[in-house]
Image (spheres, rainbow, N blue to C red):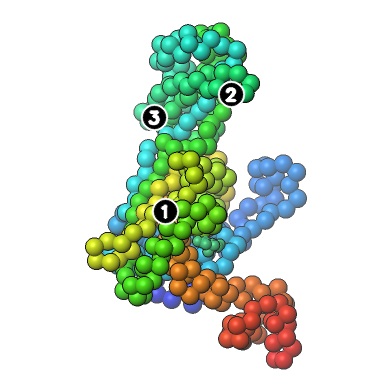
Amino acid sequence: MPDSSIPKFHEKNREERIKIVKSFAGLSKEDTEILKNNGGISFDEANHMVENVVGILSLPLGIATNFKVNGKDYLVPMAIEESSVIAAASKAAKIARKHGGFTMKSDESYSIGQVQVLDVDIKSAIPKVMKASNKLLEIANSKSKTLSKMGKGAKKITCKKLKTKSGTMLIVELLIDVGDAMGANITNTMCEGIAPFIEEITGGRVLLRILSNYSTRRLVRGTAVFDKEEIGDKQVVDNIIHAYEFAASDPYRAVTHNKGVMNGVIAVANSTGQDTRAIEAASHAYASRNGKYTSLTRWKKDKQGNLVGEIEVPMSVGIVGGIVNVHPMIKVCTKILGVKSAKELGCIIGAVGLAQNFSAIRALASEGIQKGHMKLHAKNIALSAGVPKNKMNEVVSRMVKEDSVSVTKAKEILKEL
Ligand code: MEV
C-alpha cells in the first residue's frame, strides 16, 4: 500500500514532486502534463462553463502529505492562495499518524429538496400529501433512471407547517439518496417534477422548488488522536483545550476557529471541484444548530494525556457530474486522491478540516501563528517586491531572521545585495 508520509516533500522541486505523486497515484503521462499546464482549462472550456468569460483565474495547487484516513494513505491536493495551510495540514497529519491517523464516517448522500406550497388548507393538505407519498416518490424517481437503477433516488416525503409573516405555508420535503453526485441538479429536477401533482392534490399554489443546502442528512464526523509528546509539553495540550473552550463559548472566536477548519475543507473542495459555497453555508448553519454559533470541532484529553480532536460537519460533495466530469485538473486531483465514492471524499475533507484546525490552535496556543506564517509568506512578499529568483532565498531568510517581513524590507535587502 502506498505511503503518504514522504520525507522532505517540500524541499523537492516541481519535477520531483510530480514524479512522487505520479507513482503514488498511478498517474499517466497525460495526467502529469495536465498538472504542468497551470490551470487545466482552455478559454473555450471556460466559456462553456459560465457567462461573459474574459479569462481564467488560477490558484496554487499543492499536495498535503502524511494523511491516513480510515487506515488508507492519501496524498491530498489542496488549491488555496493562503500560505502555510498546506504545510500545516501535512504537519498535523504527521502527528495524527502516530495513533493511526483519522477515523472518519460519512452519512449516506441524502439530499433534501423543498417544495413551498401557498394558499392551502394545511390541516387537510398534509394527510393528502402523505397518502400520495408513493406516487410522489414514483414521479420524482422517474426523473433519474440512473439513480433508480442503483437503488438510490427519492426515498421519503415529509411535510412541515411553517408560520411566517406572510402567512402559514406548507413545506413538502423530499429526501433523495443522490449517490456519488453532489446532487443539486437532480434534487431541483425532482422538486420541479412533483410540484404539479402536489398542487393537484392539495389545491394549493407551489412557489419555490429547490434543494436545501443545509445538508444535515449528509454529515461527516470523525476523530484523531494527537500525541502529547509530539505536541510539546503538557502545558501546550492544556492550552489547546483552553483555546477550544474559547471558541466553544464565544461566537467571535468560533467564526475564526471555524475559518481555520474551512482553510482545509475548502482547499480540498476547490481541488476536487465541489460547490464550496454550499459547503460553507451548511457548515456555518450547522455551527449554529443549537441556537448559538459555536465550534465545528471539539477537543479533549484522553487518559494518557494525548489530545483528541473531533469534527462533525455537513459535507455535500460528489465525484461524478458537473465540473468533476469536465475539468481536466479536477479529474487529475480526484485521481491523485484515489477516492471511489463521494462518502470517501467527504471523509478526507473532514479529516483535513480537523487537521487544519489542530495546527491553527496549536500554533495560537504556543508560539502564535505569525512566526510560521510569515516564514512562508515571506516568499510571496519577496515576489511582490520584484525579487529575482537567484536572490529569493537570501532575501527571504534575511527578512525572517530580522523579523521584518514587508515589501519595503525586501526592496531594501535587494538594494543592498
Ligand atoms: C487563518 O487563516 C486561520 C486562523 O485564524 C484560524 C484560527 O484562528 O483558529 C489561524
Q: Earlier in the sequence, mark 2 or mark 1?
A: 2
Q: Quadrant of the N terminus?
A: bottom left
Q: Is residue 211 shown to the viewer in this render? A: yes
Identify the residue at image location x=57%, y=60%.
Answer: 80
Identify the residue at image location x=63%, y=52%.
Answer: 41
SS state under label 1: strand
Image coordinates for residue 217, horizontal then vertical, percent: 41, 36
Q: Name which residue type carries label 1.
A: Thr
How many C-alpha atoms fall within 10 Å of the one at disc 2: few (<14), some, or many (≥20)? few
Residue identifier under label 3: 152
Q: Quadrant of residue 128?
A: top left
Q: Name which residue type carries label 2.
A: Thr
Disc 3 residue: CB within 8 Å of ligand 1: no
Of badges 2 and 3, nearer the viewer stands: 2
Q: Quadrant of the C terminus?
A: bottom right
Q: Name which residue type carries label 3.
A: Lys
**Front position in the image: 206 or 236:** 236
Residue identifier under label 2: 164
How many C-alpha atoms fall within 10 Å of the one at disc 1: few (<14), some, or many (≥20)? many
Q: With respect to residue 66, does 408 lie above or below?
A: below
Residue identifier under label 1: 297
- On residue 223, the disc is none
**Front position in the image: 371 or 255:** 255
Image coordinates for residue 250, horizontal then vertical, percent: 50, 53
Q: Is residue 132 left or right of residue 49?
A: left
Q: Earlier in the sequence, mark 3 or mark 1?
A: 3
**Front position in the image: 259 or 34:** 259
Identify the residue at image location x=60%, y=12%.
Answer: 119
